[in-house]
Every structure is written in C-alpha cells, then in structure tokens.
Amino acid sequence: MTKRLVLLALIATAITLFFAFDLGRYVSLPYLQEQRGALIELRDANPWLATLGFFAIYVLATALSLPGAAILTLAGGALFGLWWGLVIVSFASVIGATGAFLVARYLARGAVQSRYGARLKRINAGIEKEGAFYLFTLRLVPLFPFFLINLLLGLTKMRVTTFFWVSQLGMLPGTFVYVNAGTQIAQLKSLGGILSPGLIGAFVLLGVFPLIAKKIVDLFKARKVYAGWKKPKRYDRNLIVIGGGSAGLVSAYIAAAVKAKVTLIEKNEMGGDCLNTGCVPSKALIRSAKYASHLRRGDQFGFENVSGQVNFAQVMAGIKSVVASIAPHDSVARYTGLGVECIKGEARLLDPWTVEVNGQRLTARSIVIATGARPAVPPIDGLEACGYLTSDTLWNLTERPRRLVVLGGGPIGSELTQAFARLGATVTQVEMLPRLLSREDPEVSACVQARFAAEGIDVRVNTKALRVEQTDGEKHLIVEHDGVEDAIAFDQILVAVGRSARLTGFGLEDIGVRTGRTVEVNDFLQTNLPNIFACGDVAGPYQFTHTASHMAWYAAVNGLFAPLLTLRGGPFKVDYSVIPWATFTEPEVARVGLSETEAKEQGVPFEVARYSLEELDRAITDREAHGFIKVLTVPGKDRILGVTIVGEHAGDLIAEYVLAMKQGIGLNKILGTVHIYPTLAEANKYVAGQWKQAHTPEKLLAWVARYHAWRRG
C-alpha cells in the first residue's frame, strides 16, 4: 500500500507541476512553429541526444496521460522526417501507453476487480475472448481519447504483451498520418505555403483517415463474422422479410415504397398474431363484453328491465367477421399491389444471404427476421393432458366456458378475464405475484382489482399453480397460497402468462445467429451477422404492435441504405425513449415513460401532478366518473418524465402526452392549449393546471396584490 501511495503521489506531483508551470505551452503548434529552427539546430548538433531526449519526453507525457501527444507526433515528423520520425514516435507512444496501462493496473485493478468483479464478469470474458480485436479497433478508429484506453484496459485482465503488440499495430496507420503532416508543417515558411499541394494533401489525409480506418475495421469485422460463408456475387433481391406480422409488413412496405426489390415470406396468415389472434379479435371480444356490461347498467341511463341473452357462438362469429373486414389491409393482394413479392411457405436460412422457401432459393443483401412470438406455456404437471387454451387458440371456441380459470395477471390475462366474466363465465384469475398488472403502480393494480371484484371475478394473487388433476371427469387446478393448497374446479383453463419469441424452425441456429430470450440485436437492430436484422416481438424489448412497426422502420432503412448511411456517421439507432402502451380492461390503463414506482427504483427525482377523473364533467355525464391522470415531472420544471392514466379511453387520452414527451413540450404548453368542452381530453389540461397551481409564484403574486390595491386607490 505504501509503494502505491508513493507512486500515486509522484504522479500527482508531476501532473500538478505540468499545469502549475504551464508546461503545456511547449507542446503547442505555435511553439513548434516558433522554435522549429532552434530545435533543428539542436538536432543537427547532437542527433542522438536530441533523439533520446524527444523519445523520453514522449514516453513520459504518454505514461502520465498529459495533453499534447498529437503535437508531439507532429513534432516528430517536423524534426526527424517521415520514416525516422515514424519509428521514434511509434515506439515511444506504445511504450508510454504501456506505462500508463501498467500504472493503472498496479494502482487500481485489484480494488476495482474485487469491488465490481460480478459486474465486470462479462467485460472480463469479452476481453479474454475478443480483447485484441477490440483494442485494435479502438487504436485504429479512436472512439475516445487514447489515454482513456490505456487506463481503462489496465483495469482489465488483458495481458501486457497483447496490449503492447496490438497497440503497436493499431496505432501505426494513425501515427504515419500525423508524422507525415508534421513533415509538411516543417516546410511551411510563409502563409503562401499553406496552399502547397503537400500540406493540403497531408491535412486532407488527416481528415479522411478516420473514414478510411473505419472502413478497414469494417472489412476486418466482415471477414471475421462471415468466415466460412461464401458470399453471392450478385443478389436476386434487396431485402427478404421473414414473417408477415406487423413488423414484417411494415419492413416490406418501406422497402417497396423506396423501390427496392423485396420478398415477404409468411407460413400462416398475413397480418400475424395482431390481426388473427391478438389485438383485433381481443378488442372485438372486449367490445362485446362491454356492451353486455352496459346492459346490466341500464338503470344508470334511465332504462328499466333492460336485459340481453349472450349468444356466445354469435359473439365469436362477429369477431371473425371483424377480422375478415380488416384482413384486406394486410392481404397478399394489397402488398402485391404495393410492389412486394409475397410467398406463402416456410422460410429457412441457408447462409447469411440465402433463404429457401418451397424448394426455391432466394438471395438478398439484407434479411429482416420478424417472426413474432407465441404464448408461453409453463411446465405445470397435468396441464398438457387436460388440454388448455391460449390467446392463439381460444378464438376457435363456439361454446362459452361455464367455469374458466385464467393463469396470468398481466395485460392479456386481465383483459380476457374481464371479457369472459362479462359474457357470463364464472372466472377465477390466478397470479403468482402480489398484484395484477405488476408493471404498473400499486394504485393502478388496486383500481383494476377492485373493479374485477365488483364484477364477481375471483382474483387469486400471491397464488402459485402447482398441477392440474382430473377426477371423475372433473378438472381441478391445484394452487398454493400462503403454504396452503386449494383446488379450483374448471371446465376450461386459459394460459396467459406471457409470450416467447419464435426463434426456432427457420435456421437461425444453423447459421449462428445469437439468441437468448429473443434474437440478440444491437442499437441498429443488427444481429451478430450485420446484414441480418430483427424487429418486433422476436427481438423485443417491448411486445406491442406499435413498437414492432416502429422497429421495422429502423430495420428496413438500415438494411437497405447501409452504404449511404455511412455518410451521416452510420445507421439509425432505434429510439425507445417514448413508448406508450395500454391495457384494455375497465378501467382502461395507459402509460408512457416512467411510473412512480420505476422513478423511485431508479433514483430519478420527480414531482407528481394528479387529477381525478371523478371531477371531470364529461366523465360524469357518461357515467364513467372513475380513475385518474398522474403526471411525473422534473422537480421545479414542467418537463414530463412519465404519465399514467386510469379511466375511460385512457389509451386515447395518452396520445397528447406521447406527443409532448417526443417533441419536448411541457405542461405549460398543454395548459395553454384549447381543449373542447365537454370532452375527456380536458382532463389533460386540468392536470396541467394542478401542476401550475403547485408552482404558483407566491412572492410575485404578493406584489401583484399590492399593485391591484394601489390601482384601487
């Protein structure tokens, strides 16, 4: 410890002296120009002493991470010429960098690794496996200052010899460019020399070097990533999209819109889960269920003896009719008309550019994986034997279940629980966690759960499903709550515990695309094979139709315009900053941004503005006076961090806040916007008013009161 403290003190003293005596003025371009003649005389008088002195200064400056390395590199060219300067600077810079690397390792690596070892496990593994390549890339294309690379890599387990030789190779091209520029600066004798071809060429090389280096790195990466694959000499298509759901349809649409040749492959029905088994049929079911609930509330609207008999088969037939009405929007005919080649069949990836379907081989520069997700089914004993429904299969029902158990308290489970209960089924909802809709704030869960209880739904939270038993033709779900087992009788059981990405059956594993719970993608939606993109539910992180469409734009544009996008600095990063969602229970729940719970967990400071929809005129007239709007803002400012809405048409009301957050509009501007009376949207203005009232400038108003008193005489 004593040796470390002494070394740290010496380094701190050296750095302090450097700045205290303004030694930085000696490593500046004006000084180099001013003293060039004297320095050359010194070099000529004693070349070896000058060389050793320059070498030592460069090593010391680099080892101490002092500013001025770029000027010293230029000085190397100016004083010693291109080739001798290149040799001196190349070795001095690497020795100095290795010195900084060793100092950081000696002083801090043990403490950092012992304290953050668990968090650094993945980094250490990556350094061990790919460290040399990462370092080479950083040296060739400096994403951040070299001295930071030296210090940070010193905290890792990279071998010293690896650091030295990779740095030597990686820094050599850049060193050459700077030393060459230094030779040209040395020749500058007058302002007219600025226009000399040599100097102009040197500075042009300095400017384009990062682009050239990046291209070299990209070529290295491509050779490594695609090793073992034979790239086609030409391609049949610009883009192949696997999956005809929301993400796939939007990807194909964009490609066709920009006149690319695109093929869309879907093995089932166009429109994917959203149209055929998800959003569309579930919302049609919820609408029928809501109508049934309104019949039971006839007295609230002045009607007596209102009744209606649920014809479940007719309800389900109506849902199919709704799906059929919307299907043309996603049909083969429409997309063919837009310029998309649509193929029905099972796609299989043969290599990073080739897809086989129906015995035909198609090639494309870029491929988009948009295979969606399927309902997850937990491994519960007896479940498979007794049979179960999922959000994919329940639409084949023609007879209403008398007793229905719903496994899952998330959005899908909760929506279907309430819908079936309103259509006359006796429903028991089972959730392992302490509350429904666990991603929302506890008060939101409480509102929904209270409504479910009022409608006669048996909600079991903190309850674990153990097994399914069948005795004498009677089916029972055995559950455990607080250590006590109970049996729930049912006729049908609906599994709604989440959805799993569709990752198998089309060749991802055969060509080495990395997957976990989803296909692993970077910020540009590229897989580890950069020409293969993934978007929508198969890639996450949100499993919403609107997010799938949002991601599809990035996947398609990045895949189609990769060479052109290098001119803007690279492909587009997918933006998840403002993602809204809604759960279509009653009360409806919608959110965008942070919830109060998340803000607390993340340590984000916030203030809360809240407005109760019980006070809203339109909600009262509609007999829907329940719920609230809660807005989180930056303390003392009107900038919105997140919004939660619970109440009628929450999914529609949230749109104003989505726009506000996306465009940087605060509550003051929402307050100053005219909203139609009487509408539910007025609540957005009123919650802004609540925020304004909480931030009333009391001191200013006191002076205003005095002004008015003076005006009265």
Image: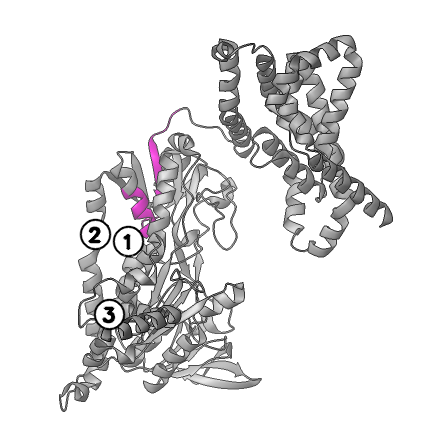
- Circle 1: residue type: Gly
- The stretch in magenta equals 234-253
Q: In the orientation shown, which residue stands out farthest toward the bottom?
A: 305
Q: Is residue 525 left or right of residue 127?
A: left
Its colouring scheme is one colour
Marks 2 and 3 in Cβ contact (< 8 Å):
no
Q: Earlier in the sequence, mark 3 or mark 1?
A: 1
Q: Position of residue 455 (x, y in %)?
A: 32, 85
| Mark 2 burial class by Cα count in 10 Å: few <14, some 14-19, many 20+ | some
Secondary structure of the residue carrying tag 1 is: loop
- Circle 3: residue type: Glu
| Residue that numbered label 2 is attached to | 329
Give 653 or 365, whichever is nearer the viewer.
653
Q: Tell me, for residue 682, which label it has, or none.
A: 3
| Residue that numbered label 1 is attached to | 271
**What is the tally of numbered marks visible in this picture?**
3
Q: CA distance from mark 1 to mark 2?
A: 8 Å
Q: In the orientation shown, which residue stands out farthest toward the right?
A: 2
Q: Tell me, for residue 692, which label it has, or none.
A: none
| Mark 1 burial class by Cα count in 10 Å: few <14, some 14-19, many 20+ | many
- In which quadrant of the rendered view does residue 224 lie? top right
Give 354 or 251, whichever is nearer the viewer.
251
Q: Is residue 277 visible?
A: no
Secondary structure of the residue carrying tag 2 is: helix
Secondary structure of the residue carrying tag 3 is: helix
Q: Is residue 401 left or right of residue 437?
A: left
Marks 1 and 2 in Cβ contact (< 8 Å):
yes
Q: Position of residue 446 (x, y in %)?
A: 41, 80
Q: Earlier in the sequence, mark 2 or mark 3?
A: 2
Q: CA distance from mark 3 to mark 1?
A: 35 Å
Q: Position of residue 252 (x, y in %)?
A: 30, 42
Q: Earlier in the sequence, mark 1 or mark 2?
A: 1
